[in-house]
Image: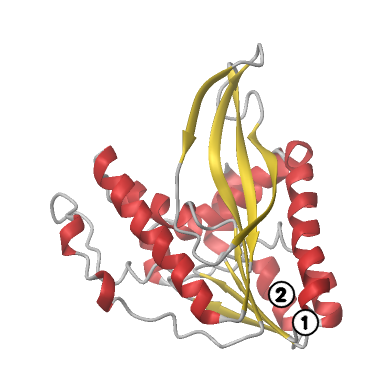
């Protein structure tokens, strides 16, 4: 915990990122990735292969990676070897990612609220009202136009992070999350001619007998994106969240 706290203090970010918990999330993810490295390795390998397979097909000169995070799921060295420009988009960039960007002129870091909501949502001002969100008037992404855009395991996380700060009823959250997801996909398709998306679409809770005790799913309007492949991510091995069950996510990959 002390190391996490020190890392939190050393991680740069805007006041918005701090207030909404994104700096803490970035640090927490890095330490969790270390604890769960063995369980997460198949997911990391599958993510890398998915991106690499499509990179070889698209052969883009410029790439925009939205939700670049700690670059765990991104085969960044392979992309750097062939691409001319890579934009890494996230609300927080770790010291390690900032160091990589300083060492490589091909990388440009962009700190951006990809939901376009944090600037208008207010904390502690009363019950969350879905009707108060001006979906059609939200600020545009204003990101560089590129050959290829990747949404990196972000689709479910955008509304989830907001809901952790602004508690909602289950019904309100489902409507809110669906709107956020659909808008994200719509904007992806406007950002570049070629789009790659991978995200968790199902969360399974498995007891020690191997029986599934709960399963959570969600839907999204995938528009012109076509299903490509899927794999399981053991995100919380036994003992990480509970000694009685582990958590697996079904990750699906789509492209156009």
Q: Is residue 189 left or right of residue 97?
A: left
Other residues around mark 1 within 10 Å, as few (<14) / some (14–19) / many (≥20):
few
- Residue at horizontal 65 percent and vertical 14 percent from the top: 208
Of 253 and 61, which appears nearest the observer?
Answer: 253
Q: CA distance from mark 2 to mark 1?
A: 6 Å
Quadrant of the image containing the C terminus: bottom right
Of 224 and 18, which appears nearest the observer?
Answer: 224
- Residue at horizontal 58 percent and vertical 81 percent from the top: 192
Give the vertical position of 202 relative to 198 (above or below): above
Element carrying mark 2? helix
Which numbered dot is residue 103?
A: 1
| Residue of label 2 | 99
Element carrying mark 1? helix
> Farthest top residue?
209
Quadrant of the image containing the N terminus: top right
Residue 75 appears in the rendering? no
- Give the image quarter of residue 122: bottom left
Give the vertical position of 249 relative to 144 (above or below): above
Other residues around mark 2 within 10 Å, as few (<14) / some (14–19) / many (≥20):
few
- Residue at horizontal 56 percent and vertical 57 percent from the top: 26
Q: Are marks 2 and 1 in contact (CB under 8 Å)?
A: yes
Of 171 and 125, which appears nearest the observer?
Answer: 171
Residue 203 appears in the rendering? yes
> Farthest left residue?
126
Q: How is the image coloured?
A: secondary structure
Q: Is residue 158 left or right of residue 139?
A: right
Report x, y in % for residue 146: 62, 86
Count of numbered tags: 2
């Amino acid at each position: 915990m002390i190391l996490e706290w020190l890392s939190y203090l050393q991680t740069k970010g805007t006041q918005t990122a701090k207030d909404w918990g994104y700096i803490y999330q970035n640090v927490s993810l890095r330490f969790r990735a270390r604890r769960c490295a063995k369980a997460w390795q198949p997911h990391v390998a599958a993510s890398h292969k998915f991106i690499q397979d499509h990179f070889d097909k698209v052969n883009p000169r410029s790439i925009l990676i939205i939700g670049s995070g700690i670059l765990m799921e991104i085969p960044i060295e392979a992309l750097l070897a062939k691409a001319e420009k890579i934009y890494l988009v996230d609300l927080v960039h770790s010291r390690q990612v900032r160091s990589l960007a300083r060492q490589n002129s091909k990388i440009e870091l962009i700190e951006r609220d990809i939901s376009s909501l944090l600037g208008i949502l207010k904390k502690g001002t009363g019950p969350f009202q879905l009707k108060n969100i001006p979906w059609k008037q939200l600020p545009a992404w204003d990101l560089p136009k590129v050959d290829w855009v990747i949404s990196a395991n972000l689709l479910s996380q955008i509304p989830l992070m907001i809901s952790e700060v602004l508690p909602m009823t289950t019904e309100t959250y489902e409507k809110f999350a669906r709107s956020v997801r659909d808008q994200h996909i719509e904007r992806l398709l406007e950002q570049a001619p070629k789009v790659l998306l991978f995200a968790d679409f199902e969360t399974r809770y498995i007891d020690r007998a191997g029986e599934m005790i709960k399963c959570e799913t969600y839907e999204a309007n995938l528009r012109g994106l076509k299903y490509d492949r899927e794999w399981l991510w053991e995100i919380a091995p036994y003992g990480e969240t509970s000694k009685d069950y582990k958590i697996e996510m079904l990750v699906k990959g789509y492209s156009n």
